[in-house]
Every structure is written in structure tokens, then in C-alpha cells.
Amino acid sequence: MLSRVPDQFSWQGIESLQETPVSGLIIMHQSDLLAEDYPYIAARKVLILLDKWDFSLALKWIMQGVNDSAAYDDLTRIATWIVSEKARISWHNNNLAQQENILQTVLDAIPVPIFYKDEFHIYRGCNQAFSEFIGLPKESVVNHSVYDIAPKELADIYYQADQALLDSGGTQVYEAAVKNAQGEQFEIEFNKAVFFKENGDKAGQVGAMLDITERNRLMRQLDQASRTDPLTGVGNRREFNLAVSITLQKAQNAYGSTSLLTIDIDHFKSINDRFGHSCGDEALKFLVSCIHEAIPATGQVFRIGGEEFYVLLPKLDLAQAKQVAERVRQHIPEQVMTLKSEPVQMTVSIGVIQLASENMLEESFKRVDQALYEAKMTGRNRVCLAYYD
């Protein structure tokens, strides 16, 4: 019968199911089935031959996991089973290849880089966008580990994240740097999920990569802009609030000191009235430059409003901060700027305080403002110190 079928068959005897390949077609008489064969029945395509076929007996064997059963002398049924299973295997293989081709086509049509790995962290597939993004052909990705396609310091990050995802068995979103084959670095948001085998075991993970380099750059620019005075380029009050909190925390941990200067330009209104507001803006920028020249490198300048500035002095106590304030006060009048072809000199009044703690900041600000007011009221171009009760 099988000679009339175009397919070719080869047969060999076996001693047990354990020695047979999963892809083979196995024909066994029920009396030849050994106890140690039972665990392998469901994982093989087995036709059990019965001395006499009946439905109840056939059902019993099917419940044991056999593929089908037939009477040992029912050659037509045996041949039909062989041909049908061979055809089914052929169709399945062709269909599987077709499905893989369709899947790859779909993946390649997606502009977002996509990859999938097995449970051993080996790449088993990716789309064209992934290949183009990292600058490697697919054959240099598929069947390779992340250590084959990324620098070790980055591969360590990916591997640890992959392992954590496989351990949890769910989904994962995180950001990490990615370098392509040309050495260009990008900021990437990874969105990954575990997929499973038919028996419920974890089979691997699939991931999509979103390039957030430009988004993060814009966010950093916006954040920086929100903390920067657009005229002078120094920090604004929001930036000061962040900086003073961090500085005080470091000082507390190191048992150190932190001081604050509050600086106000004397008679600044006269500059605006005489030269105009655009020249007043130039004067403010000039002042900031002068302050930077006179303070330590660790000092930070902030524009709090109008012509008033804060200078944060980490690691300096009140006496040291007073010396810095005097240096600023003396330095500024020595610097001459030109506004509308006229030389202009400025003086400043300064209040100085040594900050106590973060929970006393409002009290510190109040007292240093009082010191600044005292400097103004006692003749300007002066430095006055603030104290606690």
C-alpha cells in the first residue's frame, strides 16, 4: 500500500520508546509496551496495535496518551494512519515555516526595534528596525547573547534585568543606555514581557525599544530652564531651594558649616531710570560676573528677584563668609562697565548669616534680610551680619 504513496519511508526496530525520536512514527503491539515506556507515550506519535480492536480498549489507550489504535491485521487502517500522520507532519512543518515568515514580515513592518530571546538569554529573533538601530545584521544577532553585541558594562545591566524578568514571569519597563556598532549612545526605554511554553514553563522574553534620547534631552532642558534665571543664567529661587537643602544635608553629615549672603544693588532704580531697562539688564549680568570673580569656586549664585541675589557658601562659617562678603563688596565698585558710552560703577549692600538647619531656614532668611536692611539703612555699600537669639 505504501509503495503507492509518493513519500519515502524507512523502518527500524526498537527496544523501547525512550530510544525513539520525537518526530518519528511508532507502531507497537500492546504486548510489547513496557512499563518504562509509559512516560514517553504522550511525547511520541504512537499507533498501538490490538489483537482485536474495540472502542473501549481504544479509548483506554488514547487516555494513556497514544496517538491512535488499530487491530494488528487491519492493514488498511495502519497504512492510512501512517500516510495521514506523514501528511500532517509535512503540513505542520510547512505551515510553521509560513507562520514564521508571516511573523517576521509583521515584525519588520514595525518601525520600533523588537527582539525576543529564549530562557537562556539567547537572541532567537529580531526585526529590521532592531538590526538597523544597533548597526548589526540579523545573523550577528540571532543565536548570539547580549554579550556578543553590547559592551560588557551595558550587557551586565541587560542580563540582570533579563534575569529579574524571567524570575518574576511578568512584564518589565526600565531605562538604560544602548550603544550601537558605531559607538553612538542612546537612552532607551525597554518594554519587555515573558512568554511561555505549552506546558507553562517560561520560554523566554520579548522586548521593544523606545528611543527616548531626544525626549530626555528636552526634559532636562525644560527642568534646567525651570531652575535657571533666563537673564543672568544663574539659578532661580526654585534652584536655590533645592541647592540649600542638599548643601545643608551634606554639612550635617560632615558636621560642617554653610553660610549665605544676600546681595542687593544700591540705587539700582537710578540705573534703569537713567539708561533704560535694557541697560539695567546688562548691569545685572555684569554684577553676576563680578560676584563669580570674588567668591570661592564652591560658591553658588542665585537670582532671587529684581536686583537681589543669594550666594550659598558651603563649608564656610560666619567669619569666613564675612570675609567673602567684604571681598565682593570691595570688588564690585572696582569694576567699571559702560552703558551708552558712559562709565558706570555699582555698589552693593550685603547681609550674611550662617545657616543653622533646614527646619530653621525661614528664620534664617528673615534674619539675613534684616541684616541686608540694616546695611541699606546705615549707608549702603556695607556688610552686616545676622545672628540668632
Image (tube, rainbow, N blue to C red):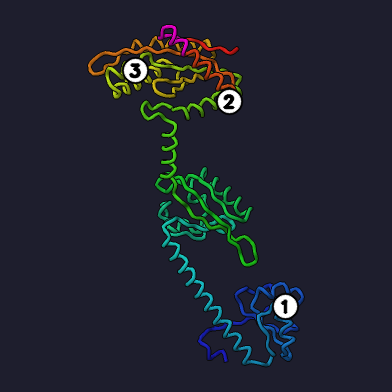
Report the span colored magenta: 373-383
Front-most of residues 17 and 163 = 163
Mark 3: give few (<14), some (14-19) or many (20+) Cα within 10 Å. few
The residue that disc 2 covers is 249
Secondary structure beneath label 2 = helix
CA separation in Å, label 1 and label 3: 98 Å
Mark 1: give few (<14), some (14-19) or many (20+) Cα within 10 Å. few
The disc labelled 2 sits on which kind of residue? Gln
Q: Which residue is drawn at the image coordinates 36% and 14% (left, top)?
A: 267
Which residue is at the far right? 35
The disc labelled 1 sits on which kind of residue? Gln
The residue that disc 3 covers is 269
The residue that disc 1 covers is 64
Residue 104 rendering spot, x and y as whole percentages: 45, 65
Q: Which residue is drawn at the image coordinates 61% and 82% (left, top)?
A: 11
381 is higher (above) or lower (below) than 287: above
Q: Report the label total.
A: 3
Quadrant showing the C terminus: top right
Residue 370 rendering spot, x and y as whole percentages: 50, 14
Is there a contact, CB below 8 Å, between mark 2 and mark 1? no
